[in-house]
Image (tube, coloured by chain):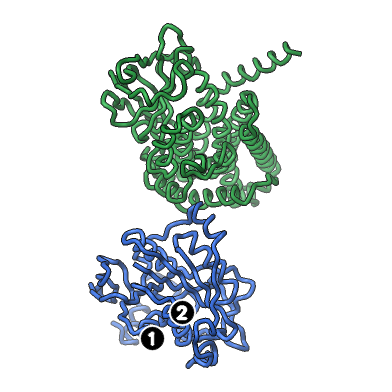
Amino acid sequence: MEYFLTEQQRTMKSLARRIAEEKILPIRAELDEKEEFPWATIKELANADMFRVFVPKEYEGLGGGCFELALVVEELSRVCSGVAVVYAASALGSFTLMGYGTEAQKRKYLPALASGAKLAAFALTEATAGSDAGAIKTTAEKVDGGYLLNGTKQFITNGGDAEIYTVIALTDKSKGPRGASALLVEKGTPGFSFGKKERKMGIRASSTRELVFRNCLVPEENLIGKPGRGFIMVMKLLDLSRPGVGAQAVGVAQGALEAALGYTEQRIQFGHPLATLPVVQDILAEMAIRVEAARALVYAAARTVDSGVYDYTETSAMAKVFASDVAMKVTTDAVQICGGAGYMKDYPLEKMMRDAKITQIYEGSNQVLRNAIANDLRKRKART
Amino acid sequence: MNVVVCLKQVPGTTDVKIDPQTNNLIRSGIKNIINPFDTYALEEGVRIKERCGGKVTVISMGPPQAEQMLRESISLGADEAILLSDSAFAGADTWSTAYTLAAAINKLGQYDIVICGRQTLDGDTGQVGPELAEMLGIPLVAYVSRIEEITDRQIQVRRMIDEGHEVIQSPLPAVITVTKEINVPRLPSLRGIARSNSAVIPVWNSQEMGIDPNKVGLSGSFTRVVKVFFPERTCQAEILEGELTDQVDRLVDKLKAAGLV
C-alpha cells in the first residue's frame, strides 16, 4: 500500500530497517535469552541519529512527530520488539518535557536525549495504580528548595538504565489525581534508588524496574508545567504515545508474517510446500490483511496526532487496540502454521508471540481503552 | 589532521561478466557499491578525524555515476568528496589510476595521511596504494590492521604479514592501505544522509589537475588485459566403491603408488 512518505520519512524508515537487519537481527535471540540491556544497539541507534527523530530541531533533533517515531518503532519491532521498546520508552520519557517544559529545561535535557547520550523513562505505574492510574500514592511534598519525593514506582521501562525520569507524584495528596504533578528526576539524585528488576515473558531486551524514592529532594526548577496538572499531562502524553505502541504491534506482526511465509514456503508436507495448501494460504492471507489494516490505522492515527487537532484520544486508542489485537492474533497464527518449528526457540516466532502480548496490556490495557472509546461515543451521542 | 581517502566504485556482485572485445569487466546494468575494502579506509579516516580533528576528503576516479558513491561517503562521515572524471581516464590500469589520484592529491595540497583499501573487489591487484605512495614520494605501509598511535608527525601501525604482524613507525605524510580487521565500518546517520543529499561534489578533469593526457587512461597504461579465462580443471576425483575394508586397502595402495605415504 502506498503511504505517501516524504523523502525524509523514507530515509528514516529504511535506515531503521538497515540497523534492525544488520545490527539487531544477529543478536536478538541472545538478547532475549539473556535478558540483557542492548547497550551496543542503543549506541548504533544513537550514532545513526535515531533518537533525534522525535526531538524538535531547536534542541538538536530532526523535528519529526508521532508519525516519524512510529515509522522507526515499526521497523525496529519487526526484528526485535525489546529493542524497539527501549527506544520508544525514551521518547515517552521525553514527551512531557517537550510538550510542557520550560525553555531552560528543554535546553538542559533535550540535546543529550536527542544525541542518544542519555535515555529517558516515564514513571506513572505503582503497585496500587495500574489501569487505575489515579490511585498513585507517591508524594512530592513542597519543601524549601524543591519537592521531597517519597514512594515506589513499578514496572518502569528503562528503569535503572535511563538517566532522566519523568515522575508523576502527588504534590497535593488531598486532591487525589488533581493534585498530581510531573517532575524530572535525574539518576544519581540522593534518595533515588532502583528496586527489583523484573523478569518478563517478552520484550526481554528491555529493562523493567522499580524506582524507589526515599526523601529524594528534587529541585523546584525540575517541576514540569504547573503543579496539579500532572494527570492531565499524562492523559495527553498517553494519547500521543499510543500510536507508537500500535507501530510496535504492527512491526512484530509484520515480522511474524514474513517469518511464517518464509518457513511455509520451504517446509514440504504431503509433497508440497505448506504455503501452497489452501488452509495455510487462508491463514497467511488473513494475517496479511490484518497487518496492513493495522498499519493503515496506526499511520492515520499518528498523522492525526501530528496534524494539531485538539482531541485525538479516541483515534489514538483505536489504533493501539486494533494493532495490538492484530499482533497477538497474527503472531499466534504464525506459530500455529509453522507447527513444531514455530514453537521452538531456534525460530523467531515464539519470541514474537511472547513479545506481542505486552502491546495489549501496557499504555492503557485494551479493555480500559475500549471503555474510553465507548465513553467518547456516548459523549458525542449525548451532544447531538 | 588532513586525511585523504581513495575510494573506488565496484560492481556489487561476484557474478561479473567479461567483455570479449576489451577483456574488461562489463559494468553496465550492475548495481555499484563502494569497494568493500575502501569502506574500512573511509571509516578509519573518519575515526582519525574524530580523534585528532581536521577533515576527511574523499577522492575517486571514475565515471559520472560514481558521484552517488561519493555522496554516500559523506553520509558516512567524509567532509568533502571530489570526483576525478574525464573520458580520457577510461581504461586506466593501476599505474595510470595511481598517477591520476596522485595528481589530485597534489592539487589538494595539504595532507597528512592517505588511506586506501588493501585492494579492490574487481581489479583485485592491490597495486594502486603502493604506486600512489611512490608517485607522491612518501612512505607506504600496506595491509595495516590497526593504527596504534598517530601524531602530527608520525604514525605507528600494526601491519599484517603472512606469519603474524609487524609494528611499523613511519613519518607523516604517508600512504597506508588497510585490511578489514582494522575496524567495523559504521552505518550512515540521518544527519549525514541529509548532508550528503545537499553536498556539492566537484568534478575535476585532466585539464583542471594539469596533467599530461598521455599518462592517463588507456593511453597512459603500461599494461593491457590480453585474455581473461578460467583455468582448466586438471585434477580429477576418483570414487572408490565396494566393501569398506576393500576400499581402504585400495586407497592405501594408491597412496603408496603415488609416493604419498
Identified at 29% across, 21% down, the residue is A216
Question: In the image, A240: left or right of B97?
Answer: right
Identified at 37% across, 35% down, the residue is A162
Measured along the vertical axis of the image, is residue B139 above or below residue A152?
A: below
Q: Which chain is green?
A: A
Q: Residue furthest front?
A: A103
Measured along the vertical axis of the image, is residue B119 above or below residue A96?
A: below
Instruction: Say which mark, if any, is on residue B104.
Output: 2
Measured along the vertical axis of the image, is residue B168 above or below residue A128?
A: below
| Residue type highlighted by circle 1 | Met
Mark 2 burial class by Cα count in 10 Å: few <14, some 14-19, many 20+: many
Identified at 52% across, 72% down, the residue is B9
Question: In the image, B59: left or right of A68?
Answer: left
Q: Nearer the viewer, residue B233 or B239?
A: B233
Foreground label between 1 and 2: 2
Image location of residue A151, percent across then percent down: 34, 17
| Mark 2, secondary structure of its residue | helix
Quadrant assignment for the C terminus of chain A: top right
- From where the camera sits, is residue A78 visible? no
Image location of residue A76, percent across then percent down: 51, 44
Asked if badges 1 and 2 are on one and the same chain, I answer yes
State the residue position of label 1: B135
Image location of residue B63, percent across then percent down: 58, 76
Mark 1 burial class by Cα count in 10 Å: few <14, some 14-19, many 20+: some
Chain name for mark 2: B
| Mark 1, secondary structure of its residue | helix
Q: Which chain is blue?
A: B
Chain name for mark 1: B
